[in-house]
C-alpha cells in the first residue's frame, strides 16, 4: 500500500490578479524581429538588501521588439537589478534599489512608450481603455500610393507631382514606423521598423517615389492584419475570464439574499446559484442538488452531478437545480484565475525551437544588413556595376533581412497550443513541455487515483485474534481516519457504516509507502501493508498464504498489528475508471509503451495492469522505487512521462521528462508544481496532449521551413536583379501572415 502523509502540505497560493485581455486592444505593431527573451531577466548577480519591485503597465509593449529595447535601455540604468516581462498583459516588473521610479519612467519614455505605475493594491484588472486608432490615415496612404503608381506608369504628370503624392502616402501611413525606427537606430537595434525606415528612405533618395509609397503602405497594412490575427492568440486565455459573472447572490447577516460584485464577496460567504446561471466563485456545496457543466475548467463534455460537500468552480454553469455553496477562494484566486495565470506564465518561457530561432535571428539580421551594405558598394566600386541598380538591390535585401515570419511563428504557435490545451482541461506549464511531448515513447502511471478511482471499498475482514475483534475494527478505523490514503479511508468508511465509535489517536505518524502508526489507549499500533509486516518481523507462513490468496484476486491487504503481532486483516478493492482502458489503448496506437508503478503488492498490480492492457507492472514500490524505475527507463534511452496524483509520486514526477498531475481542479499544489495538470480524472487527456504536441511540433517545423525557404528564394532572385521592393514586402509580410494563420489552426475546435 502506498501510504502518504495524513494531510497534504499544500503551499498557500499567492493571489494573482488576472487582467482581461479585451479584443479591442489596438497594437502599434506585431512584427517581432527581436529576440523573444525569457520572462525573467537578471541584470545583477544578487539583489541588494533595500531592493523593491515596481510594476508598470506599458500599452505599447506587446512584442519582443519593445521588450528588447526596454531591456537594453534599463540594463544601463544604475540600481536596476531584475526585469520581469509579461507581454500578454503588457506589464513590466522592475526590481530596483532606486529611491523612486522616475528614472525608470523617463528611460522608457525615451523609447516612445509610456510606463504607468501600478499602485500596490490597485485592481489589476482595471485596464486603461486603449486609444482608438483612426482608419483614415491608412486609407489615405493606400489611395495615394496607388495614385502615385498610376501617374508614374501612365506619365500623366511631371515627376514632382508623383513625388508629392508618394510623400503623402509615406507620411500618412508611415510616420509611426519612422518614429519607432529612429528610436531603434538610436539604441543600436536593427528591428523591423529600423529596416523599413532605411529601405523606404533609400528608395526615395534614388528617386523610386511610387515604390517607396507602395512599400510603406503594404507594410503598414500587413502589420495591422497581423496584429489583429495575433490578438486572437493573445486573447484565447484571457477570454476565459469573461466566463465568470460580475455579480453573485449572497446571503446577508439578516438572512436576506442580495446581489454583490464577486470581487467584494468574502471567503466563507454563502452564495446561491439558480438553474442556468454561471457560478461566480469557487466553493463547496452546502445544500441542493444539480448538474454542472464544468467544460471551461476540466474540459469534460458531460455535466457532472453535484450535491452537498462537492466542489464547484467559478465560470462553470449550473444546469438543473438550485444550489447554495460556501465560498472557498476569492475571485482573483479561483481555479479559473490560477489556470489563466499559469498559462500566462507559461507563455513567457521559451520552447527549444524558440531558443533556436532567437539565436538564429540575432545572427541573421545583422549579417543580412552587412550583406546589403556590401551589395550596395562592392559591385559598383570593383566590378563596374551601376550604382542605381545595386543600391536598389541592397534596399530589397533590407526588406528581406527582417526575420519577422521566423521569429513570430514560434510564440504564436506555442500560445495557440497552450490555449487549445487549456480549453480541453489540460493545463501545460510551458512551451517546452508542449513541444517535447511528441517525443515521449514511455509513460509510467501510478495506480490508485490514476488508473483506478482511488475510492476503494473494504471487501474482506478477518480477525486473527477473535478475542479482540471489535477493538481491532475500532483501532484500525481510528488510525485510517487520520490518513488521507484511499485504502485507509475505505476501512474508516466501513467502520462508520457499522456505527463503530472511533478512539483517540496520539503520536500519529505516516510511514511512506508502508502505512501509519499511532498510540491508542497508551498502546502502539501499526496499520500497514505486507512490506510493513515484513519490516517489523511479524510475518508467518500462515499469514503469507492468506495474503497471497487475497492479493491474487486483485485486492489490497492491510493489517492491524500491535507489538505482539497481527490482530486483524482487511482487504480492500478499488474500481477501474471507465476511461483507463481506452486511454491505454490510444497510447499504444500512438506508439507509447506503458508501465504501472504502485506501492501495492505485485499480484494486485499485475491483475489491474492486465485488465486495462498496460504493458508492464511493478508493485511493492516505495517513492524511491518509483524514481529508480524511471531512471532505469532513461538508462535504456527512453523518453519518459509520469502520471500520478499523490505525494508519493513526487520524486518520479519530478524526474520524468513530463510530469502529469491527475484531477488538478481546485488543487493549488498540482496546478503550481506539475508540468502538465489534467483538470479532471480522465486519462484520455494524455493521448490528447500527445496528439496536440505532435501537431504543434509539425506546425513549428512547417513555419520554420516556409520562412527560411522564402528568405533563401528572395535572396537568390534579388541578386539576379528580378526582385522589387514591393514584391519583397509582399513576400516578407505575406509569409509572416501565413505562419501566424498556420499557428492559429491549433485554436480550431
Image (cartoon, rainbow, N blue to C red):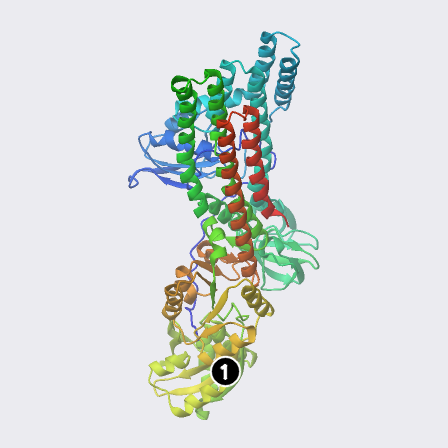
Q: Is residue 124 visible?
A: no
164 over 298 or under it: above or below: above
Q: Position of residue 362 (x, y in %)?
A: 40, 35
Viewer-proximal residue, 73 or 405?
A: 405
Q: Position of residue 370 (x, y in %)?
A: 39, 27
Q: Residues within 10 Å of mark 1 (few under 14, many from 20)?
A: many
Side of 54 where 697 appears, left or right: right
Viewer-proximal residue, 347 or 221?
A: 221
Q: Position of residue 228 (x, y in %)?
A: 60, 35
Side of 526 where 310 appears, left or right: right
| Residue at screen point 65% across, 48% down | 258
Which residue position holds label 1?
Answer: 571
Viewer-proximal residue, 388 or 622?
A: 388
Q: Position of residue 292 (x, y in %)?
A: 65, 58
Tag 1 secondary structure: strand
| Residue at screen point 41% across, 76% down | 620
Looking at the rendered structure, the number of numbered marks drawn on it comes to: 1
Q: Is residue 646 visible?
A: yes
Viewer-proximal residue, 166 or 8?
A: 166
159 over 27 or under it: above or below: above
Quarter of the figure with the N terminus:
bottom left
Amino acid at each position: 500500500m502506498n501510504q502518504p502523509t495524513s494531510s497534504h502540505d499544500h503551499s498557500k497560493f499567492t493571489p494573482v490578479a488576472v487582467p482581461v485581455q479585451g479584443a479591442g486592444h489596438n497594437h502599434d505593431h506585431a512584427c517581432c524581429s527581436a529576440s523573444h527573451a525569457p520572462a525573467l531577466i537578471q541584470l545583477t548577480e544578487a539583489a541588494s538588501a533595500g531592493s523593491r519591485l515596481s510594476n508598470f503597465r506599458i500599452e505599447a509593449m506587446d512584442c519582443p521588439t519593445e521588450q528588447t529595447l526596454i531591456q537594453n535601455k534599463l540594463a544601463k540604468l544604475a540600481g536596476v537589478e531584475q526585469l520581469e516581462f509579461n507581454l500578454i498583459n503588457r506589464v513590466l516588473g522592475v526590481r530596483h534599489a532606486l529611491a523612486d521610479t522616475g528614472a525608470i519612467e523617463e528611460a522608457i519614455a525615451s523609447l516612445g512608450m509610456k510606463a504607468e505605475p501600478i499602485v500596490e493594491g490597485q485592481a489589476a484588472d482595471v485596464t486603461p481603455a486603449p486609444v482608438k486608432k483612426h482608419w483614415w490615415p491608412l486609407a489615405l496612404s493606400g489611395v495615394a500610393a496607388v495614385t502615385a503608381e498610376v501617374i508614374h506608369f501612365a506619365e500623366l504628370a511631371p515627376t514632382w507631382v508623383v513625388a508629392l503624392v508618394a510623400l503623402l502616402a509615406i507620411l500618412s501611413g508611415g510616420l509611426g514606423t519612422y518614429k519607432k525606427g529612429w528610436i531603434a537606430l538610436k539604441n543600436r537595434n536593427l528591428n523591423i521598423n529600423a529596416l523599413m525606415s532605411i529601405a523606404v528612405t533609400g528608395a526615395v533618395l534614388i528617386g523610386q517615389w511610387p515604390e517607396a509609397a507602395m512599400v510603406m503602405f503594404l507594410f503598414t497594412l500587413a502589420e495591422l492584419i497581423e496584429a489583429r490575427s495575433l490578438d486572437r492568440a493573445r486573447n484565447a486565455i484571457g477570454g476565459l475570464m469573461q466566463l465568470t459573472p460580475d455579480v453573485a447572490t449572497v446571503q446577508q447577516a439578516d438572512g436576506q439574499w442580495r446581489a454583490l460584485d464577486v470581487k467584494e464577496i468574502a471567503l466563507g460567504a454563502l452564495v446561491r446559484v439558480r438553474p442556468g446561471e454561471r457560478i461566480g466563485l469557487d466553493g463547496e456545496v452546502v445544500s441542493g442538488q444539480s448538474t454542472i457543466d464544468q467544460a471551461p475548467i476540466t474540459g469534460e463534455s458531460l455535466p457532472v452531478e453535484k450535491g452537498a460537500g462537492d466542489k464547484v468552480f467559478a465560470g462553470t454553469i449550473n444546469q438543473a437545480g438550485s444550489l447554495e455553496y460556501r465560498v472557498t477562494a476569492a475571485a482573483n484566486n479561483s481555479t479559473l484565475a490560477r489556470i489563466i495565470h499559469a498559462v500566462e506564465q507559461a507563455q513567457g518561457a521559451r520552447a527549444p525551437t524558440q531558443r533556436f530561432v532567437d539565436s538564429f535571428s540575432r545572427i541573421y539580421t545583422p549579417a543580412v544588413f552587412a550583406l546589403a551594405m556590401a551589395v550596395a558598394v562592392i559591385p559598383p566600386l570593383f566590378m563596374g556595376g551601376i550604382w542605381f541598380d545595386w543600391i536598389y538591390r541592397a534596399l530589397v535585401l533590407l526588406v528581406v533581412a527582417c526575420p519577422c515570419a521566423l521569429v513570430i511563428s514560434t510564440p504564436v504557435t506555442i500560445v495557440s497550443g497552450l490555449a487549445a490545451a487549456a480549453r480541453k482541461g489540460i493545463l501545460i506549464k510551458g512551451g517546452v513541455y508542449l513541444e517535447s511531448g511528441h517525443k515521449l515513447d514511455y509513460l509510467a502511471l501510478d495506480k490508485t487515483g490514476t488508473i483506478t478511482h482511488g475510492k476503494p471499498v473494504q471487501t474482506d475482514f478477518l480477525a486473527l485474534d477473535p478475542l479482540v475483534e471489535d477493538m481491532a475494527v475500532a483501532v484500525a478505523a481510528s488510525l485510517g481516519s487520520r490518513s488521507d490514503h484511499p485504502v485507509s479511508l475505505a476501512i474508516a468508511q466501513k467502520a462508520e457504516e457499522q456505527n463503530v465509535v472511533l478512539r483517540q489517536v496520539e503520536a500519529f505518524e505516516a510511514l511512506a509507502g508502508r502505512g501509519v502508526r499511532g498510540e491508542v489507549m497508551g498502546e502502539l499500533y501499526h496499520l500497514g501493508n505486507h512490506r510493513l509486516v515484513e519490516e517489523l518481523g511479524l510475518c508467518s507462513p500462515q499469514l503469507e498464504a492468506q495474503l497471497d490468496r487475497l492479493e491474487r484476486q486483485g485486492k489490497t491487504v492491510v493489517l492491524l498489528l500491535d507489538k505482539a503481532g497481527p490482530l486483524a486483516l482487511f482487504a480492500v478493492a478499488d474500481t477501474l475508471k471507465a476511461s483507463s482502458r481506452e486511454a491505454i489503448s490510444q497510447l499504444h496506437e500512438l506508439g507509447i509503451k506503458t508501465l504501472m508503478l504502485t506501492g501495492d503488492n505485485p499480484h494486485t498490480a499485475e491483475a489491474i495492469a492486465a485488465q486495462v492492457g498496460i504493458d508492464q507492472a511493478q508493485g511493492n514500490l516505495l517513492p524511491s522505487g518509483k524514481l529508480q524505475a524511471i531512471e532505469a527507463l532513461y538508462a535504456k534511452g527512453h523518453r519518459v512521462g509520469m502520471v500520478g496524483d499523490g505525494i508519493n509520486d513526487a520524486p518520479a514526477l519530478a524526474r520524468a521528462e513530463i510530469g502529469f498531475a491527475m484531477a488538478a481542479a481546485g488543487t493549488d499544489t498540482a496546478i503550481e508544481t506539475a508540468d502538465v495538470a489534467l483538470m479532471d480524472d480522465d486519462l484520455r487527456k494524455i493521448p490528447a496532449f500527445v496528439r496536440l504536441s505532435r501537431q504543434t511540433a509539425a506546425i513549428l517545423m512547417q513555419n520554420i521551413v516556409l520562412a527560411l525557404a522564402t528568405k533563401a528564394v528572395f535572396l537568390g532572385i534579388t541578386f539576379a536583379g528580378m526582385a522589387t521592393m514591393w514584391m519583397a514586402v509582399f513576400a516578407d509580410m505575406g509569409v509572416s501572415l501565413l505562419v501566424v494563420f498556420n499557428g492559429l489552426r491549433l485554436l480550431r475546435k
